[in-house]
Amino acid sequence: MRGFTIFMRKEAREIVRTWRIWVLPGIVLLFAISGPLLAKVTPELLKSVAGSQSGVTILIPKPTYHDSYLQWAKNLAQMVTFAIIVIYGGIVSGEERSGTAALVLSKPLSRTSFIAAKYVVQALFLTVTVTVGALITWGVTVAVFGASPVGLLARSTAVWLVWALLLLAMMVLFSVLTGSQAGSAGLGFGVYIVVSLGALWGPLARYSPSALVDAPSSIAAGGGGELAWPMVTSAALSVLALWCAVLVFGRKEL
Amino acid sequence: MTDAAAVPAIQVSALTKSYKGQLALDHVDLTVPQGSVFGFLGPNGAGKTTTLRLLNGLAVPTSGEARILGQQVTRGLDRNRASVGYLPDVPGFYPWMTAREFLLFAGGLFGLRGEVLDQRVSSLLDLAGLTEVTSRVGGYSRGMKQRLGIAQALINAPKVLLLDEPTSALDPIGRKDVLEMIAALAGRTTVFFSTHILSDVERVCDTVAVLDHGRVLVQAPMAELKRQHGAQRLIVEVSTDSAQLAEEFAAASWCHELVRRADGALVMTVDDVAAAQVDVPARIAAHGLGLVRMETPEMGLEEVFVDLVGGTN
């Protein structure tokens, strides 16, 4: 793969030198810190709201680290997922439109390297960002709730990451297919809805990535079933999406 | 055994490109000898950028083929990339990089490393007049981007340099610098240079092709092209202005068009120069007048271009 390392280095530097270093880490950091605190104060808030209305009594169990982890898992499954769809909608089309793709691909850089380097660097960035976010969540959870098991949070985050890496691969494909950020973001949201709804049908819920959408929350709450098949199919679909992206991009005129 | 120098730098055969049934290039044939500075001339929309994109493998021809240094240009698999430098009409740079960073990045893609790369980057920044500029490319003027574009196209010391409208965004001094730089490459690097600016081609190119509506109207060495088209005009001055003589010339079988200038000179477009050169002095003598001047002037490229392109429109 000609030019892979050099282009990977450029992608990494682009993250550090542009808005990319602030947006996704900023969102993740915000939820990492606010999640445990919200989990702690939400019952108090509900109690005070209920107390102001005569005749209403709400029994709320004392919050635990499970609630903190659940907040984190829900934020990953929704807000961070939406952020990925929007941020990575233009991962390839942005370079096509600005003319940078045509310029760099007229040099000894293969189109496969172009796609692969983008995916690898952004996947690493996403993994590091979410891992740091999870560690911060754990630290704040310990500070707020006392001793908390890190394994539960790690499992919940890892399962979401597998789904997120599939979504990233699909965003690369959609960006190549549509040539526009808005178009690929629209397709990304569509896929998110379809995959989420897939969890309602037994076979899909057992074997497909649909199982991974809600699994982080279930794991955080202390549950979670067998996820080996959904993990394998997600990994396979990620590879397939990237392969299709390389094929389509290879035939595209710039 | 093939003589490497005899292989054309660029060979284009029946190259055709259509977009949704609309022909952008129509059976284009071109031969660009090694070491030449080749002007690819045409009005906007003639198909110049499409040709360059096809030569770069950034687009695929509908039919026909293109070869660079004997190798067929195949998108994504082009083995010639290391020998080719390319400047697009609007070069796209990463706005967060500085000029030096972009050149280091571009050189890295060609496998250049260490001191060789550093030295080449420094000399190209100097050539582009960007040595002192440390700001990011996003803040550059179009002229600065164009100069950086030329510098990046030269980073691999290419054997074939493809330039798409390299002077279009430059001020007169910038244009002069770029043209001098192109002229300096003659003989060492083949420069294929698309433009709609006639004076630029006239200044630096030794061979020229004129493209219009996706078709090559003519390809020839510059001098030959001017001679071919220039030979069709005749300027005649006689000792005394004679309307009758002018009428006779206009009616002659070899005369296509005649214009009487304010100074009395007769400017004729002729179909047969040899016949005119015999007939004109004879008729002047028959009228008892003296021949002051008779010449077939060298035509400027602009006139050739207007003659060619105007004729097709």
Image (cartoon, rainbow, N blue to C red):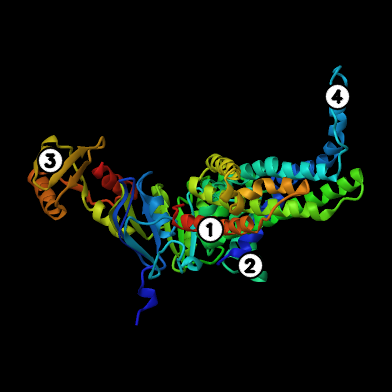
Which residue matches tag 2? B117
Q: Secondary structure at mark 3?
A: helix
Q: Position of residue B108 (x, y in %)?
A: 61, 65
Q: Nearer the viewer, residue A28 or B311?
A: A28
Check disc 1: other Cα within 10 Å, few if <14, some if 14-19, many if 20+. Answer: some
Check disc 4: other Cα within 10 Å, few if <14, some if 14-19, many if 20+. Answer: few
Q: Nearer the viewer, mark 1 or mark 4?
A: 4
Which residue matches tag 3? B250
Report the Cα–Cα distance between label 3 and label 1: 76 Å
Identified by mark 1, the residue type is Leu
Circle 1 marks a residue in which chain? A
Q: Nearer the viewer, mark 3 or mark 4?
A: 4
Q: Secondary structure at mark 4?
A: loop
Q: Secondary structure at mark 1?
A: helix
Check disc 3: other Cα within 10 Å, few if <14, some if 14-19, many if 20+. Answer: some
Which residue matches tag 4? A57
Which residue matches tag 1? A240
Report the Cα–Cα distance between label 2 and label 4: 75 Å
CB of mark 2 within 8 Å of CB of mark 3?
Answer: no
Identified by mark 2, the residue type is Leu
